[in-house]
Image: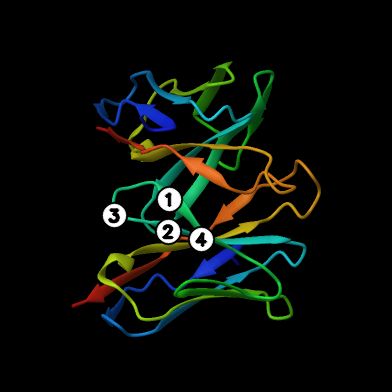
Amino acid sequence: DADVTQTPRNRITKTGKRIMLECSQTKGHDRMYWYRQDPGLGLRLIYYSFDVKDINKGEISDGYSVSRQAQAKFSLSLESAIPNQTALYFCATSDYVGGSYNEQFFGPGTRLTVL
Amino acid sequence: RKEVEQDPGPFNVPEGATVAFNCTYSNSASQSFFWYRQDCRKEPKLLMSVYSSGNEDGRFTAQLNRASQYISLLIRDSKLSDSATYLCVVNSEGSNFGNEKLTFGTGTRLTIIP
């Protein structure tokens, strides 16, 4: 079984709808992240969480919200989806290894299309 | 200027050849550097870290040039399975514990031709 899972894997929705993307991990890591990937723009950080009580905005948090329900679960919500939120979304986790939290482990991604 | 810049490619290279990619970064305080590999429609995975003295892992060699603020990845004796997008990644928050923030380049696409 995969260590970092994301649901759904694919989603097509309409403008204005509320969408939730879910991420679960069995790695026991404290830190979790949400990124989006767009062609030509690379991976951009939306939100990150260092533990259950800690939530931080990334570089492109507008239009998104997150919830860290437990150490193993981190969900991303689009309150009112718009077409420019069409992208590939990745969840990632990291743990303290070798003096840093540098290596991140990614889920398989969720491909979201907003019509 | 982007924090991390890479040539997007594509690089089309015959099997068995040697190929090299460079990546430049803008934050001179960056302390940690990495190459991630991303296969088509898959998640990124860590390929190797990049150390100041340079490091090698089999056919892969990574080097860091702090003075010129670039890192490189060299792949020798390329295999068909090396076809992927290679992401340059920089810890842009410096070396303070707990402040790791990875900034990803847009990636260089490599295709190995039989």
Tag 4's secondary structure? loop
The residue under the point 70% across, 75% down is B53
Labels 3 and 4 in the same subunit:
yes
Query: Which residue is situated farthest in the left direction here?
Result: B114
Q: Tag 4, which chain?
A: B
* Spatial separation of the CA atoms under disc 2 and disc 4: 12 Å
Residues packed near mark 4 inside 10 Å, few (<14), some (14 to 19) or many (20 plus): many
- The answer to whether the residues at label 1 and label 2 have Cβ atoms under 8 Å apart is yes
The residue under the point 67% across, 75% down is B69
Q: Quadrant of residue A6?
A: top left
- Residue B40's mark? 3
Residues packed near mark 2 inside 10 Å, few (<14), some (14 to 19) or many (20 plus): many
Q: Measured from the top left, where is residue B85 in percent x and y?
A: 37, 62
- Residue B84 higher or lower than B44, as above or below: below
* Spatial separation of the CA atoms under disc 3 and disc 4: 16 Å
- Residue A25 higher or lower than A42, as above or below: above
* Spatial separation of the CA atoms under disc 1 and disc 3: 10 Å
Q: Tag 1, which chain?
A: B
Q: Tag 2, which chain?
A: B
Which residue is identified by label 2?
Answer: B37
- Residue B44's mark? 1
Lower sequence index among marks 1 and 2: 2
Q: Given this view, does label 2 or label 4 mark the residue nearer the observer?
A: 2
Q: Is residue A29 left or right of residue B40?
A: right
Q: What amino acid is labelled 1 in the image?
A: Pro
- The answer to whether the residues at label 3 and label 2 have Cβ atoms under 8 Å apart is no
Lower sequence index among marks 1 and 4: 1
